[in-house]
Image (cartoon, rainbow, N blue to C red):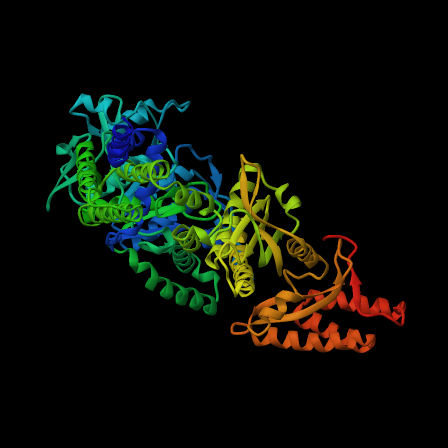
Amino acid sequence: MKETKKSLWEKVKKYLHYGIIPIGLLFGILFSLTYTGNIFHLKIYDLFSNAKSKPAEWDKIVYVDIDNQSLDVIGRWPWPRKTMGEAIEAMNIFGAEKVILDIEYIDKSDITLDEEVYQYVTEYGGKLTSEELINNIAYNPDMSFAKSIYEAGNVYLACRGVESTLKSNESDLQTIADTYFLPLKDPKLAGQLVRDDFMELPVFPLYTGAKGVGYTSIEYDPDGVVRRIALFHTLGTNYLSAHLSVIALLDELQVDKSNIVIVPGQHIILKATNGDIVIPVDEKGNLLVNWSNPFTNSFTHIPIVHFLNYYNNIQYMTKYADYFDAETLSLISNENEELKKKLEIVRGKIVIVGNTSTSQTDIGSLPIDPYSPLVLVYGNVINTIYQKAFLFEVPFWQNLLLMVIFSLAILLFDRRIKAAWQEVILTVIALLLLVLTYLGAISWFGMVFNYAMTLTGIALIYIGYVVAKFILFDKEKNFIKSAFMHYLSPEVVRRVIDNPALLNLGGEKREITAYFSDIQGFTSISEMMNPEEIVAFLNEYLTEMTNIILENNGTVDKYEGDAIVAFFGAPLLQPDHAKRACAAVIAMQKRLVQLRLKWKGEGRPEIIVRMGINTGDAVVGNMGSQQRMDYTMMGDTVNLASRLEGANKFYGTMSMISETTYEVVKSEFLIRELDNLKVVGKDKPIRVYELIDTLADASAGDKEKVEVFAQAMGLYKTKKWNEAIQIFKELKEKYSDPPSGVYMERCDEFIKNPPPANWNGVYVLKSKG
C-alpha cells in the first residue's frame, strides 16, 4: 500500500509542473484583457517602438517654431493676429507650399490701434529724422489676418470638436462644413468613428481664405500617452472632417477626397495620383503613429522670429527709408541677406507652425519623449503616411497562435529537462526568442503583438515552476534563493545555492566590514514632498545604491527609512571585504554626483549622503523568531560603523572609515586622517579617516589636498596653532574644504584657550551626529 502511494506521488511530482504551462497561458490571456494588462502592453510597446529603427523623415516637413527665442523678441504669447499675418506673408515670400497653423483662433479680436510707429520710435528713435510718423490708426485685426491668409492661399486652420459650446456659430459651422468637410456617404461611420456634434471654429472672416480646416483633437491611451491619432471624425451624421495634418496631406498627395474608403478596424484607403495608400487603423479609425525622434532632434526647425524680422526689415526699408540714415539702412539690408539664407529652407515645403516654448501648455507624453510639444504629432502623422511606415496591432487569433507555438515548444523541450537550472535556461531562451520575434515583427513588418498576453504567460510559467520546485523537489535550495535574492548579489546567491554548507544559518563570529549610510537632513527634505513623491524618490535612490552594493558582492542587511545598512564578508568569506566596501562607497558617492544633476533638472532635492564603514569581528547569521528571521549582523563593529556615519556631520565629510579599515586598504585608496576622537558610547579613542577616491582615479588636486592637510595636521598635533591655521585657511579657500574649516575653528579656540599640557589630540564628540 505504501509503495502504491509512493509511486502515485512520484507520478504527480513528475507531471504536475506540466500543468503550469496551460494555466500560465490562460492567465496571460485573461491578464491582457484587464486595465493593468493593457497598461503593461502599452509600456512594453513603447520599449519595442523605441528599440526599432526610426522611419526616414520626409525632408518636405519643416517646423516654424514659436519658441523661447521668438517670445523673447516679440513678447509673451498670445501675439496680435497682425503679427501672425506678417509671419504668414513672410513665409509666402519664401515660397512655403503649405502652412499648417496649430493655433486655434476661435474668438474675435477687438478693434485696436496700430502701434507700429511707436515700435519704430522705440527701436530707432536716435536715427529718425522726423516725428511725422506718429499717428493712431484704428484697424480690425481679424480682417488684417484674414487678408494675409487669403493672399497666401495655402494656410490650414484649426478647429476642435467639443461636447457643447456657448459660441453661437451654427451658420459658420454650416459654411465651413459645406466648404471644407467631406460628405458622409456611410451613416454607419457616425457610430464607429469619433463623432463631433459641436465644433469651435476659426472666427469669421479668417476661414474664408483658408486652404483647409481640420480638427486638432489628440487621442490619449489609458496611461496618458499619445500613441495614435484619429484621422477622421464625423460631424453629426452628415459630414466627415479630417485631422489638421491629414487635410493638408490630402492636398499634397492630390487625394480624391470624394472616394476615401474607411473601414474601421481594418484600413483607410486614400486614392492618390501616385497610387492607393492603404492605412491600417483600429476600430475607431486611429492610426498608430510611427514616431521618428524627440522634437528637437526631428525634422527641420526654424524660429518664427526670423520671418518676422525679415518682414519688418522689408517694411522699414520700403515705407520709411527716408527716415533712416544710410548706415542704418545698410545694417538692415545686411541682416536680411543673412536671414534669406535661413528662410529659403521653407520653399516648396509643408510648414507646421506651433508654440514650442517652455511656457506653453500644449505639452504631452509621447512614446519617444515623456514631455514633448504636441505639435510634433502633425509632422509624425504626415511622415508615417507619406513614408508608408505603418504599424498595426495584429488580431487576437495571431496573438493566440504565437502563444500556442511557444507553449508547444516549451512542452517539447521540457520533457528532456532533468534539473531546475535547465528549466530556468529554457525559460530565458524562450523569453529571448519571444522578444526577438516581437522586435523583428515590429521592425520589419510593422506588426504589434499583444505583449501582455505572451510575456505574462511565460512569466507565470516560470514563477509556477519555481513554486513547484520549492514544494515538490528541493526545499532547501529554494528557501536559500527566496531568502537571500533580495539582499545578496546574484553571484553570491548562486554559489550559496550550489553549496549550502557555505552558509551558517545559526550565526557565527567572523571579520566583516560594516556599512551605514544616511541622507543628510532628509526629514526637512521630505516635508517638501507629498508621500507619493517621497516613496518614488527613495525607491530610485535605494535602488541605485543597492545595485552598487550588490555589484561589489555586499549584503544588504536592512533599510531603515532612508538609511541603508549593509556588510561585506558574509555569508561568503571574502578576504578583500574591506576593499570591496571602500570601492562600493566611492562608486556610490560618484553615482550620487550624477544623480544630483539629474534630480536638479527634475526639480527634485539634491541630497547629500553620509557613509561610514568599519572593519572588525561581528556575529552574522539568521536571527529572529521562529516566525520571522533575518540574515543580519551585530556587535561593537556594527555600532562603530553607525557612529562613523553620523560623525561625518562634524567634519563636513561624506565618507568616513575607521583605523582598522584604513590599515587594510591604505595602499589602494586615497585617504586622509581626520581626527583622533571619542565617539558617543565609546571610552577608547579611535583614529578616523576620510575615504576620498582610489589611488588610480584620484585627481592631482585631491592628492595635493591630502598631502598639505597632513602637514597642517602635524602642526596641529604639535600645538603650533598659528602655523596650522594658516595652512588650513589656504586649503579651505583653495578647495572649499570643510574639514579645514573645522580645524581653523579649533586652532583659533586653542589659541584663545590652550589645552592642558598632557593634551593628546583626542577630540570628544558630544552627540551621535
Q: Does any portion of residue 173 appear in the rendered image?
A: yes
Q: Is residue 769 left or right of residue 472?
A: right
Query: Residue 14: percent from the left, percent from the top?
Result: 25, 36
Which of 12 and 411 lies nearest the eye of the viewer?
Answer: 12
Residue under the point 16% across and 24% down: 186
Quadrant (top left/top right/bottom left/bottom right) for the N terminus: top left
- Quick check: 167 above or below 93? above
Q: In this view, does 326 lie to the left or right of 399?
A: right
- Quick check: 25 above or below 652? above
Query: Residue 332: percent from the left, percent from the top?
Result: 43, 64
Residue under the point 44% across and 45% down: 480
Query: Residue 461: percent from the left, percent from the top?
Result: 29, 38
Which of 172 and 5 lies nearest the eye of the viewer?
Answer: 5
Q: Is residue 696 left or right of residue 190?
A: right
Query: Residue 360: percent from the left, percent from the top?
Result: 46, 43
Which of 541 and 446 lies nearest the eye of the viewer?
Answer: 541
